[in-house]
């Protein structure tokens, strides 16, 4: 149960805030029934990650209810896109087809140079007398 709690990080793309928060809260209350609401909420928010945790904690107080935290969590993730995993644009735009197009263009330009040189060479040698 403890490993399930630790391994479940919040991802705004995959998880719904309500479902994830309630599941984490149930896990913690099962593990630590004597823990205060504030500590439970703090432990859950630590699972969100740096920026998202800071954004939600700055909008809540120690007396905030779970519903308030869930609403703030949903609001922050939908409005600011904080908590969503970042897409590496370099790998997104460096696709195999782009590389193949550049490679083909380079090969075609090289082939054009060689073809034009071959045409010129053959024209010169065609006019020259055979020795």
Image: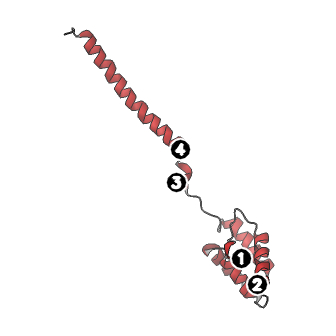
Report helix, strand or loop for mark 4: helix
Q: Is label 1 in contact with label 2 (beta carbons under 8 Å)?
A: yes
Real-space CA distance between mark 3 and mark 4, rounded to the nearest whole angstrom: 12 Å
Mark 4 sits on what residue? 96
Q: Is residue 47 above or below residue 38?
A: above
Mark 2 sits on what residue? 31
The picture quadrant where one finds residue 57 is bottom right
Real-space CA distance between mark 4 and mark 1, rounded to the nearest whole angstrom: 39 Å
- Residue 66: % across, % down: 79, 80
Mark 3 sits on what residue? 90
Decide if residue 85 is in sight here: yes
The 10 Å Cα crowd at callout 1, few under 14, some 14 to 19, many 20 or more, is some
Q: Which mark is residue 5?
A: 1
Q: Is residue 117 above or below residue 74?
A: above
Which residue is painted at 71% across and 65% down in the image? Answer: 78
Report helix, strand or loop for mark 3: helix
- Of labels 4 and 2, earlier in sequence is 2
- Of labels 1 and 3, earlier in sequence is 1
Q: Is residue 93 above or below residue 106?
A: below
Tell me the quarter of the image containing the C terminus: top left
Real-space CA distance between mark 1 and mark 3, rounded to the nearest whole angstrom: 33 Å
- Of labels 1 and 2, earlier in sequence is 1
Report the mark closest to the observer, 1 or 3.
1
Image position of 20 (left or right of 111): right
- Residue 126: % across, % down: 28, 11
Real-space CA distance between mark 1 and mark 2, rounded to the nearest whole angstrom: 10 Å
Report helix, strand or loop for mark 1: helix
Report helix, strand or loop for mark 2: helix
Nearer-the-camera pick, 129 or 59: 129
């Amino acid at each position: 149960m403890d490993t399930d709690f630790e391994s479940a990080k919040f991802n705004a793309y995959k998880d719904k805030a309500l479902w994830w928060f309630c599941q984490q809260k149930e896990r913690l209350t099962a593990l630590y029934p004597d823990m205060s609401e504030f500590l439970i909420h703090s432990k859950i928010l630590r699972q969100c990650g740096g920026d998202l945790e800071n954004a939600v904690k700055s909008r809540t107080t120690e007396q905030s209810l779970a519903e308030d935290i869930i609403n703030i969590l949903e609001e922050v993730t939908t409005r600011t896109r904080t908590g969503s995993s970042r897409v590496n644009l370099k790998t997104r735009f460096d696709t195999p087809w782009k590389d193949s197009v550049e490679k083909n263009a380079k090969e075609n330009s090289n082939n054009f140079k060689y073809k034009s040189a071959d045409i010129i060479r053959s024209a010169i040698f065609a006019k020259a007398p055979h020795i």
